[in-house]
Image: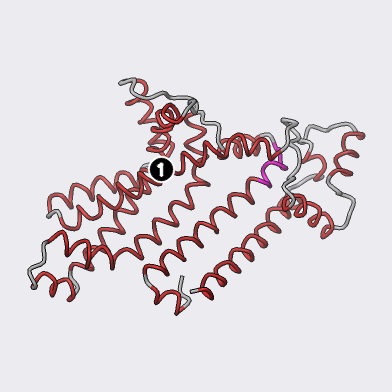
Amino acid sequence: MTGFVLRRLAGVVTTVAVASVVIFGALYLAPGDPASLLAGGNQPDPAALAAIRERHHLDDPLPVQYWHWLSGLLSGDPGVSLVLREPVTALIGARIGTTMLLVAYASVLILTLGVAAGVLAAVGGRRVDRALTVLTTVLMAAPAFVAAILLIWLFATTLSWFPVFGSGTGFADRIHHLTLPALALSGGYVAYVSRITRSEVRAELAADHVAAAQGRGLPRWTVLRRHVLRNAAPPIVAVSGVTVAGLFAATAVAEQAFGVAGLGSLLVQSAARQDLVVVQALSLLLVTVFVVVNMLVDVLNATLDPRLAKSGAP
């Protein structure tokens, strides 16, 4: 198991290192002068351009520039926003809690509703299965921004149950404010996890060991819990983990639609303003979170099924 974890850690380090090169290099792939892009592309005066070149070491060879940028990130100093004139760490620190809470809220909805709907579709009979299949098809087909519009119209404008803007203050108020964004963010993922769960549970229900357990007279819930869900857990956990990891990038749509001050909305706003210092730092942060969550899912799967650790399979 230790070797498996070390291999996954090595994979995380390699992926983040490659991503850092790509993200840094994107600045030089963009048309125009990097100094002008870092300044927002608004044709600043030569003195401002010279200051930006000096600050970001733009006259140094490219490997040296990359090392300065990476060493700043590793030391916790990704730079200062050229638009907002605030340290990037302060901008991220002020918003990361909201995004983490939104992702956690959406993850709970995805795992509970997705798994429950999948199990119900697998064991609930033909009518239940058809109804849930139609529902999950609709959810998977609806983009997050469409779901956001419908949720705002129904629950915020028509019924006035939830606020439509902001992040709230205090835990209870923040949960109240983030309910609609979490629903908009999680809808398609709930449907996807439900489909995978249904497929895996049905496959296990047809297995010989389940028939043997039923033949011994075990209660249905005991068979479902001990023999079906336990064996179906690894693929469900794997899919759910990738889904949760992807939520960090997907938050941008929900945060923008509901005026939530999180990392996703900060990334969109910074990209629109050409604030590349913030965009670079956020992009690498999101990549890092994604691969770390995937590694944790792999380790959890290997714990549930030790054969994965021995074979080295993901």
Answer with the quarter of the image where residue 200 lies.
bottom left
15 relative to 169, above or below: below
- Magenta range is 274-281
Q: Relative to 180, is 170 on the left or the right?
A: right
Viewer-proximal residue among 300 and 160: 300
Q: Relative to 189, is 66 on the left or the right?
A: right
Q: Relative to 146, is 91 on the left or the right?
A: right
Q: Position of residue 264 (x, y in %)?
A: 55, 39
Q: How is the image coloured?
A: secondary structure
Q: Residue at x 35, y 64 (%)?
A: 235
The residue beneath circle 1 is 106
Q: Residue at x 65, y 39 (%)?
A: 271
Secondary structure found at label 1: helix
Q: Relative to 197, is 50 on the left or the right?
A: right
Classify 10 Å Cα crowding around label 1: few (below 14), some (14-19), many (20 and above): many
Q: Position of residue 213 (x, y in %)?
A: 14, 71
Answer with the quarter of the image where residue 234 lies.
bottom left
Q: Residue at x 41, y 41 (%)?
A: 105
Q: Position of residue 205 (x, y in %)?
A: 18, 67
Q: Magenta stretch mostly in which secondary structure?
A: helix
Residue 275 falls inside the magenta stretch:
yes
Residue 100 falls inside the magenta stretch:
no
Q: Position of residue 297 (x, y in %)?
A: 45, 61
116 relative to 83, above or below: below
Count of all numbered marks drawn on residues in the image:
1
Q: Amino acid at mark 1?
A: Ala
Q: Residue at x 63, y 39 (%)?
A: 92
Viewer-proximal residue among 174 and 15: 174
Answer with the quarter of the image where residue 145 lies.
top left
